Image (tube, grey):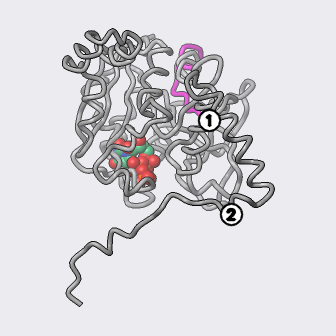
Amino acid sequence: MKKVRKAIIPAAGYGTRFLPATKAMPKEMIPIVDKPTIQFIVEEAIASGIEDILIITGKLKRPIEDHFDSNPELEASLRKKGKEELLELVEETTGLNLYFVRQPYPLGLGHAVLQAKAFVGDEPFVVMLGDDIMADEVPLTKQLIEGYERTHASNIAVMRVPHEETSNYGIIDPEAEVEEGLYNVRKFVEKPNPEDAPSDLAIIGRYLLVPEIFDILEKIEPGVGGEIQLTDAIDVLNKTQRVFAKEFKGERYDVGDKFGFLKTTIQYGLKHPQVKDDLKQYILDLSKELETGAIENSMEPEVHELEDNKENDE
Ligand code: UTP
């Protein structure tokens, strides 16, 4: 059995849910307090024993490459000023085995994964989506790798979601729970309406896949939203060889969505040594203001319309 050594992080999407922030900046570089979301994913991969990581990028994604490159001027300046702790933070994201390939058009997650065919070769591999930050005693990617080592088959991470949200996810139709939290799957369905959803078990952003998936991705027709869907290819794969669904029981932070992003920022801030005490006090004060209604009368940050500054012929 081949060892799982490679991970793919697709990061070529437009990130439309974060416009206008993502008009010229990759969504993956938006920080949770002080760390870009993609760095959490790279850290999970390394903590899971992954040796080589391929990031699928596209237009306007150069800051991701720069983030994982050295910055000699900055390093020299921090060294000169004796700012050792900051220097350590800057240097820890360099020298990793990271590779980059471009997806010329964002034709869907399945199409993004297909760009990794040559990198992966004939080895099992993991796909990790930057929209989900996972927290558990054992990293989720490691749990999937352990699942592969026991089952010798693809293992896809799933989690229960509120039934009315099934149309945001790939959903599984579980056939049998073969061991606690591990399912045989009848069908994988991309973004079903709640009335058609076969369960509440949603595919979250971690997949351990066998390389046979690439032959399927090359042939598959566009699915929901006119995109080449990874879920559709997994459903085809499941017809010729077993694809297991592994239920994740840890914490999932959905940072691809505005509210999820805010919640994650608060949770992470409450653990961050530099800001946790001030943030806790701020939240306590704020909740008192919310209770008394005082917040309604407080000053908001000003929002001005850029439209006003545009030339107007009318
Ligand atoms: P999403 O649909 O969540 O990301 O795709 P998005 O398109 O960037 O964001 P929204 O929905 O418009 O706000 C899940 C992941 O797959 C990548 C995205 O970058 C994201 O990390 N992806 C998606 C690609 O790399 N290529 C694609 O063609 C589509």
Label 2's element?
helix
C-alpha span from label 1 to label 2: 32 Å
Location of residue 52 with respect to 192 vertically, above or below: above
Give the percent coordinates (x, y) of residue 12: 32, 43
- Depth check: 87 or 254 in front? 87
Asked if the magenta segment contains residue 42, the reply would be no
Q: Residue at x 56, y 42 (%)?
A: 254
Which residue is farthest bottom?
Answer: 314
**Drawn side of residue 204 relative to residue 215, left or right:** right
Amino acid type, callout 1: Arg
- Depth check: 68 or 232 in front? 68
Residue designated by label 1 = 252
Q: Is residue 220 visible?
A: no
Label 1's element?
strand
Count neighbours of disc 1 (C-alpha within 10 A) and say few if under 14, some if 14 to 19, many if 20 or more: some
Location of residue 6 with respect to 201 vertically, above or below: above
Q: Residue at x 78, y 49 (%)?
A: 288
- Depth check: 43 or 53 in front? 43
Q: Is residue 29 visible?
A: yes
Residue designated by label 2 = 296
Q: Which residues are magenta?
A: 147-158
**Drawn side of residue 299 relative to residue 201, left or right:** left
Q: Indicate yes or no: mark 1 CB to ligand 1 under 8 Å.
A: no
Amino acid type, callout 2: Glu
Q: Nearer the viewer, mark 1 or mark 2?
A: 2
Count neighbours of disc 2 (C-alpha within 10 A) and say few if under 14, some if 14 to 19, many if 20 or more: few
Between discs 1 and 2, the one toward the N terminus: 1
Numbered label attached to residue 172: none
Give the percent coordinates (x, y) of residue 23: 31, 54
The picture quadrant where one finds residue 267 is: top right
